[in-house]
Image (cartoon, rainbow, N blue to C red):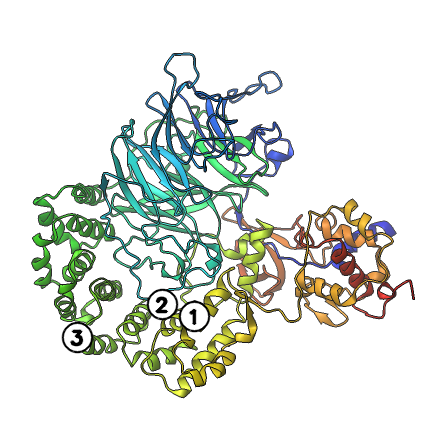
Amino acid sequence: MKSNRNRSVKLCIAFSLFILLGVSFTTFQKINPGPKVEKLKLLPDFKAEHLYSPSESKNGSWVSMTFDDKGRMIASDQNGSLYRLQIPPIGSDTNQVKIKVEKLVVGDSAQSKVSMGYAHGLLYAFNSLYVMVNHNSDDKFKKGSGLYRLQDTDGDDQYDKVTQLKSLSGEGEHGPHSLVLSPDKKSIYMIVGNYTDLPKLDNFRLPNTWQEDNALATIKDPNGHATDRFAPGAFVMKTDPEGKQWELITAGYRNPYDFAFNEDGEMFVYDGDMEWDFGMPWYKPTRISHSPSGSEFGWRSGNTNWSPAYPDNLPAILNIGQGSPTNLISSYNARFPEKYRRGLLAFDWTFGIIYSVQLIPDGSSYKTKAEEFLSGQPLPLTDGVIGPDGALYFLTGGRDLESDLYRVYYGDNSLPNNELESKSSPAILEARNLRKQLEEFQGAANPEAIKLAWPNLKNKDRFIRYAARIAVEHQPVAQWQEKALSEKDPIILLQSMVALARNGSKELNSRMLNALMQINYWSLTEAQQVDLLRAFELTVLRTGKPSPADQLKLSKYLNAYFPAKSNEINRLMTKVLVYIGDAQVIPKTMALINIAKDDEADQKGITSSSDLILKNPQYGLDIAKTLSKTPPAQQIYYAVALSEAKKGWTPVLREKYFKWFYNAFTYKGGNSYIGFIDEARKMALKNVSKEQYAHFNKLSGDGLVANKQLKLADVTQPKGPGRDWKLDDAMAVVKDSLTGRDFKNGKMMFAATLCSSCHSTGGEGGSVGPDLTNLGTRFTEKDILESIISPSKVISDQYAAKVYNLKDGSSILGRFKSETKDKIFISQNPFSPQTLREINKKDIVVTSVSKLSIMMPGMINGLNKEELKDLMAYLISGGNKDNKVFKSTGK
């Protein structure tokens, strides 16, 4: 009984540095035995098989794959060779029929250890294997980044001929990525990340007139990411089988690893977020875009990211949330139920989730419905394909992590995968065909282009309006410049001014501004007002600031409608007015800065951030910190915009403005949050007098920041080097060595490892977890270490989370806090325990206790041996500096 009692109490005494699990997922069923399959959460009637482990076989960590014309899989190690696999069919006795793995030797391998590999993209087509190499040439592998074509010229089933079709400048996780065969099976499409330079191309579907195009005071990433990267960002291009003609298709992405075509021949791209920007107004979540020919999606470095609302880029059709996209495939050819065939499968590496994204035609584009299709912990997903048998094959790995190959199929894999009947109505087909007609003008000048495009600049369909403007921009500007400047229809006028700003001469500045100021602002919808303000912004950015007379007119025009009810409009108004030197913008914006509220729906993803906390301990911890005190994005935008404002300040307004920065440092954001706030603060200080500088510098929080991070006066960060602590290793370090320890450093480690966020000792610390003051009087060193290192081994019901299974098949996990007659309230984040999520009781089918601890493992992994000893001494002492563990044996 005593032993059982100790085990039941272990978790409640161990300090949870940690984060309450809030993972929403569809109710899954476990089918196959073995830990690699048992950790997968599958939809009902789907089955999974673990086929092969490249890492266990010393064949690297695989990140890309394709099937050849003989049904064999070809895969690539991220930092090594190509491999060819013969996979037994579904239903085979795996004890009798084994998978066959062959390391490919390509061409002349005498010059390097790896003959071909380092591929982020593989495609078998045109009787050839196309390889997208992502690598800087070295002694191990001589070939550098670029597209290569491998051919078997002598019929021996080996690739003896290697042809480089295009050399690319760029490598690493933001370098060249995936390859996809075009819907008509005549071309090869490829996608690259934003660290890849645009190569020489023969044609540009998106006119190569791009610039940064943001009037907001520019702040590059304070931690140095992508500070030398500019428009057009990441892009998709295509070529013919021989690599003779090259064409840019779409651009303006951050770092999309993959893209796919659906059964309609439409392209979709899965782009990544900049997690360091989490909480900032320019943050964009991971997202799926419908990416027609000529499209632009507005990625720009640092804080100059475009809003999806701007007319010169297109919005995502689905915001997912935080994560690391690695794969996107059409599931049309899978032997799955029709619901899952009509859409995409999107892979997230960070949180180990495959999303099913059903595509619903909407005008010339699509709407979406999405759900979790498959997940696991850990499950670092890298690539996936629908095999010739109609099953889903997927890989895990990357960054030299444990790598595995899986197969997923439905039932006995006998469902048909023949062509499905189109669900597009005649109106949908008409809209799609019109957009495609307009896209045909993305090339040589065509006299018919303006005739078709011009009236469609006011089409109600945003994707058609965009295509019409791009068609206009592909025509010589002399053909439509005067037509634009004399246009009477306000919608066509503002769209044509966007085009003219991007293509016209600086001499048109005054005519363009005055034409736009003739528009009756209140006759426009809110979205059209955004378009108008963006047209003003582009005009002054591209053709120059207005003359004094035009500046006065423009200030008067804009101030008549500022401030507005819309956050988006206020952002545009503020930065444009600051840019042109307006004096009224400062008092008007300062009246907003402390009362501005963020739009809850802005950039909202399908996955709640709190639901991801325990999907990945490393990234989940960052999310939890931000959610504990989320930065006020709208206020931040105002503060950054005003950092370059010079006219209109009063002593009272300056005091209020710089005090705002001091308070802003108390919020929790992504890794670059503090740096962005501090850079804006420093930019603003350049506009104060020398006599006032010291005062405002101190007032705005100069003493709080060092090296772009907050100074933690009461917290010393671990010196390390840390390690992946195991129980036996930790016991060997701690046993018989807890004398003469450093109380002050032990207390610092208690805070640095975030124990104090949830637990108290000696009356200091958090209250989410149990008080640890009497820990050392009841538990041994081994008990304490075991509860820290293996928190899920024994879970006390006092601190366990609960799983609420809902009628819709989903489940939510969190810690019960309270209830009413109709609702249950749970907490999902110990850093913000007051933030509650409500669940309707009527939606709950079953409630159970979670098998996962509310503690996260690995939180002491940053400590070295001496730091671990000091922390353990502090825990055992209960925060008592006079405890014997802090007394030297030599005295």
Q: Is residue 458 left or right of residue 82?
A: left
Query: Element type at marker 1?
Result: helix
Tell me which label, 3 or 2, sits earlier in the chain: 2
All told, the count of numbered labels is: 3
Query: Element type at marker 3?
Result: helix
Between the C-alphas of marks 3 and 2, the distance is: 22 Å
Type of amino acid at the residue the image marks with label 2:
Ala
Residue 680 marker:
1
Residue 1 seen anywhere in this rendered image of the structure:
no
Between the C-alphas of marks 1 and 3, the distance is: 29 Å
Q: Position of residue 253 (x, y in %)?
A: 36, 49
Type of amino acid at the residue the image marks with label 3:
Asp
> Dot 3 surroundings within 10 Å: few (below 14), some, or many (20 or more)?
some
Q: Position of residue 668 (x, y in %)?
A: 53, 65
Tell me which label, 1 or 3, sits earlier in the chain: 3
Closest to the observer, 18 or 368 = 18
Q: Is residue 489 left or right of residue 584?
A: left
- Quadrant for residue 332, please give it: top left
The answer to whether 181 is drawn above or below residue 602 in the figure is above
Pointer 2: what residue?
A: 217
Q: Position of residue 276 (x, y in %)?
A: 48, 57
Residue 77 marker:
none
Residue 273 seen anywhere in this rendered image of the structure:
yes
Residue 550 marker:
3
